[in-house]
Image (cartoon, rainbow, N blue to C red):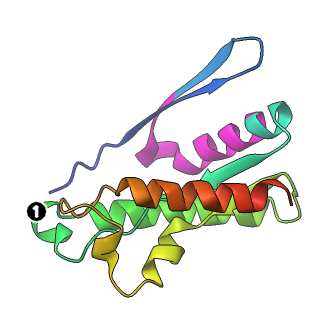
Amino acid sequence: MYSSKIYLAVFLLFENNSYFLILNNLNSNRKAVYNKIVEIGLKQYSKMFLVNICPTLPETESHSPGLSGSIDLYNSAIYEIMDNYKGEESLKLIDINSILLQQSDLKKYILPDGHHIFPSTHQLIFEEIIKHFNE
């Protein structure tokens, strides 16, 4: 079974080289942590991009049971944050999960381990960021 204890450590680096560290058990307070990250980021930067997690290949559940469910929980929290910040022009979602689910062959985007992505998929994410950067 995939670990039910997921921890998040996020460093937000600021222009003066100071940082803010968030370390939290995501099972207990996931949405509050994500909201705090967005709140701090929007105060510091003119643009902020949230990138959700790519889907897994269907066969991934056989060697990593529960991974898809964990990804769904994370992505749901990201969608909820985006709903909370509707109208906030400086916050954009890169919904790579939905983009890849529209593709005919996920194996072109996801490595054979069923979860990690190819460099070309990273490039796709980068291109999506650039597309929205000048909006």
Is 24 within the magenta?
Answer: yes
Residue 50 located left or right of residue 4: right
On screen, residue 104 above or below 68: below
Percent position of residue 46, x then y: 86, 40
| Residue ranking furthest to the left | 63
Q: Residue at x 81, y 35 (%)?
A: 45
State how many labels appear: 1
| Residue ranking furthest to the bottom | 104
On screen, residue 53 above or below 101: above
Q: Residue at x 42, y 59 (%)?
A: 120
* Quarter where residue 73 is shown: bottom left
Q: Quadrant of the N terminus?
A: bottom left
On screen, residue 86 above or below 37: below
Compare residues 19 and 1 and report the one nearer the observer: 19
Percent position of residue 20, x then y: 64, 21
Question: In this orientation, does residue 25 appear?
Answer: yes
Compare residues 78 and 98 and report the one nearer the observer: 98
Percent position of residue 78, x then y: 60, 59
Q: Which residue is mark 1?
A: 63
> Which range is magenta?
23-40
Residue 14 located left or right of residue 99: right
Amino acid at pointer 1: His
Percent position of residue 21, x then y: 57, 22
Dot 1, how many residues are within 10 Å of its Cα: few (below 14), some (14-19), or many (20+)?
few
Please tell me whether mark 1 sits on a helix, a strand or a loop.
helix
Q: Residue at x 82, y 30 (%)?
A: 44
Q: Main secondary structure of the magenta part?
A: helix
Is 100 within the magenta?
Answer: no
Question: In this orientation, does residue 81 appear?
Answer: no
